[in-house]
Amino acid sequence: MLSIARLDIADARILIAAARAKAEAIGVPMCIAITDESGNLIAFERMDGGKVTSTTIAIDKAYTAAAAKKATHEYGAASQPGSPAYGINSAIGGRLMVVGGGLPVIVGGAVVGGIGASSGTPTQDTEVAQAGVDGLLATMSTVSRPL
């Protein structure tokens, strides 16, 4: 029997709020997705002005980061011609994302979920996702509650 740590809806709301605050600060409305450790969607927000096409991209970035336990930008370099994971972006029906903006959420050394952001540049998307993770971790360090 396994015991699995995973994000819950309260965690997802914290992640989205912190990511949204960063997106507002940089002036780029985003689509923000939160998944559990298996890549299943927990929560999603498309800010006013977030690109409609970024809806699926944000969800797939969060899916990739959680399920593969790796930041999506790490797959970018590894998926280039001649690299060890060349062509991996076509795996899983094309859901595996290889551009920045998807990060695993790691607590206590375990991947407990993923966050994906999309509508800006890959760097902006990654900054927004990182702000979400940072917001959750800051909340966890100030509030005593199990994950």
Image (cartoon, helix red, strand yellow):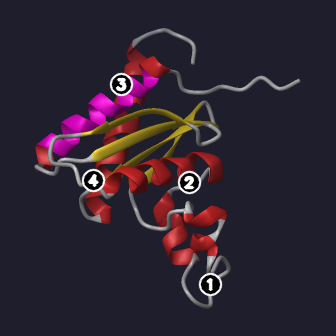
Q: Is residue 17 magenta?
A: yes
Task: Determine which quarter of the picture holds residue 57.
Answer: bottom left
| Amino acid type at mark 2 | Thr
Q: Where is residue 111 in the image (x, y as percent from the top left)?
A: 61, 39
Q: Mark 3 vs mark 1: which is more N-terminal?
A: 3
Where disc 3 sits, the SS reads helix
Residue appearing at x 42%, y 11% in the figure: 143
Q: Position of residue 72 (x, y in %)?
A: 49, 60
Residue extent of the magenta highlight: 11-24
Q: Mark 4 vs mark 1: which is more N-terminal?
A: 4
Q: Distance between the residues labelled 2 and 1?
A: 19 Å
The answer to whether any part of residue 138 appears in the image is no
Q: How far apart are marks 4 and 1 (CA)?
A: 32 Å
- 107 or 14: nearer the viewer: 14
- Look at mark 3 in the image and give the residue it sits on: 14
The reply to whether dot 4 and dot 3 touch (C-beta < 8 Å) is no
Residue count near mark 1 (Cα–Cα under 10 Å), binned few <14, some 14–19, many ≥20:
few
- Look at mark 2 in the image and give the residue it sits on: 64
Residue appearing at x 57%, y 89% in the figure: 81
Q: Where is residue 95 in the image (x, y as percent from the top left)?
A: 55, 60
- 10 or 131: nearer the viewer: 10
